[in-house]
Amino acid sequence: MKKFLPKKLTEWVTFILFVACYVLLDYAYFKIPVDLFANVIYYHGVVAVCADLVNWLAPLEHVLAKHNHLLSAKADLEIVRGCDGAGALFLVVSAVLVFPSGLKRKVLGLLFGIGLIYGINLLRICVLYFVIAYHPDWFQLIHTYVAPTLMVILGCFYFAWWAFGSTRQNHEPA
């Protein structure tokens, strides 16, 4: 693409492809039925894993996983669409897909990026469980602003690290 288009136009095409990729992922995400999310994807992929993590870290919590809820005597944390890190995940996936890099590097970037966002989101949900159980007045701030912002920032740092390693470095000796 670079051979045929001027640099500024190439940048715009890349940006448009990034936005289109993000919109397509988001559109597909909202086409997944709510019941499938709550009873299968969230339960097996998020809630059961987080319940195990919380119980491992704090065995006296006695957290149970039920459908899309983390339940204990102290808290009931419901995982719903949008609480799964999808927005940050779609940003990383879209950025890796449109960045000019080889297929092998893209596949590795996608695998590590998806794993990173998934892991960060599990940690986020575990932290939110403890926040709602012990400091419920902090929940809205952390859930709405702090945690999502951190996920996006960490996703951006990951992409920058990955992209830097994807470029050819032709440095002249000093």
Image (cartoon, helix red, strand yellow):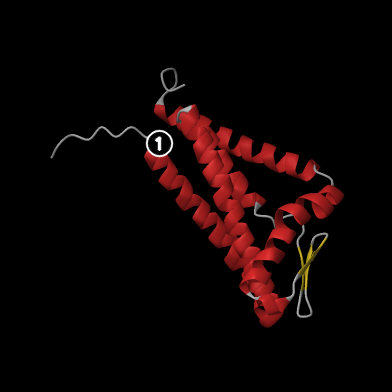
Is 13 left or right of 136, judged from the image as shown? left
Q: Is residue 39 above or below residue 63?
A: above
Residue lying furthest top in this view?
4
Pinpoint residue 19: horizontal percent, then vertical percent.
60, 39
Q: 163 or 75: nearer the eye?
A: 75
Q: Is residue 41 visible?
A: yes
Q: So how many labels did they put on this image?
A: 1
Pinpoint residue 67: horizontal percent, then vertical percent.
83, 59
Q: Residue at x 77, y 50 (%)?
A: 41
Amino acid type at image mark 1: Ser
Task: Find residue 101 and report its image quarter.
Answer: top left
Q: Residue at x 64, y 75 (%)?
A: 58
Q: Residue at x 54, y 34 (%)?
A: 97
Q: Is residue 154 above or below residue 20?
A: below
Q: Which residue is mark 1?
A: 166
Is 2 left or right of 62, judged from the image as shown? left
Is 88 left or right of 99, judged from the image as shown? right
Q: Is residue 163 above or below residue 151?
A: above
Pinpoint residue 107: horizontal percent, then vertical percent.
53, 34
For mark 1, does the 10 Å Cα neighbourhood hold few (<14), some (14 to 19), or many (20 or more) residues? some
